[in-house]
Image (cartoon, grey):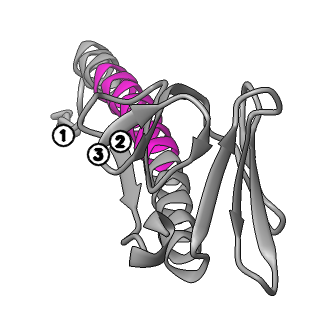
Amino acid sequence: MIKKTHKIKAFTLTEMMVVIVISAIVVGLAFTVLGIVQNNMRSIENNYEYQSKIQSLEVALTIDFTKYPVAEWNPKENELTLSSPIENRTYTFVSDSIVNDLDTFALKTKNVTYYFEGEEVKSGRIDAIKLTFNDTKDLHRIFVYKRNDPTIHF
């Protein structure tokens, strides 16, 4: 009697182990790349949020500088008061934020400079303000000004 042996086509154990090792390396690299992408996305989100806070402060200051004819800086209380005969708005500069009557802007200022008629002033009436912030480059700063009413000279 003749025995026929049929060879079954299959992978050897060594071939299967090589495929599993290569797959594990690829999956490990994929998870590493995924972690890097997630960290970058968090960083982008934080930067966007910080820039949004700076822009909303700039918009609020611009609106208030336009709305109120008189702006005064009080260095003893770290307050910027914008006023009109009807109402006034106060911005208080705290170490880690800027607070006004409506909002709180969680921004640390590095340098705040006040101007009146083009000259830097330390207190009293102002017509412009320049803010630079921590955690940003010098390119990210706010400069807000208002047009003076000619009656301030009378």
Q: Residue at x 55, y 58 (%)?
A: 57
- Would residue 1 be visible to someone looking at this image? no
Q: Residue at x 41, y 68 (%)?
A: 146
Nearest to the eye among marks 3 and 1: give it. 3
Q: Position of residue 129 (x, y in %)?
A: 45, 47
Q: Which mark is on residue 118?
A: 3
Q: Is mark 3 in CB contact (under 8 Å) with mark 1?
A: no
Residue type at mark 2: give it. Arg
Q: Is residue 63 left or right of residue 92?
A: left
Q: Residue at x 57, y 75 (%)?
A: 69
Q: Is mark 2 in CB contact (under 8 Å) with mark 3?
A: no
In the image, residue 48 sits, relative to residue 108, either above or below, namely below
In the image, residue 104 sits, relative to residue 123, either above or below, namely below
Nearest to the eye among marks 1 and 2: give it. 2
Q: Secondary structure at mark 2?
A: strand
The magenta segment = 24-47
**If you read the primary sequence from the N terminus, does the residue marked by circle 1 or circle 2 appear first?**
1
In the image, residue 133 sits, relative to residue 118, either above or below, namely above
38 inside magenta stretch: yes
Residue at image mark 1? 9
Q: Which mark is on residue 146?
A: none
135 inside magenta stretch: no
Residue at image mark 2? 141
Q: Secondary structure at mark 3?
A: loop
Q: Nearer the viewer, residue 139 or 91?
A: 91
Residue type at mark 3: give it. Gly
Q: Nearer the viewer, residue 121 or 16?
A: 121
Q: Nearer the viewer, residue 31 or 148?
A: 148
- Find residue 85 and report its image quarter: bottom right
Q: Secondary structure at mark 1?
A: loop
- Would residue 150 be visible to someone looking at this image? yes
Q: Position of residue 40 (x, y in %)?
A: 38, 36
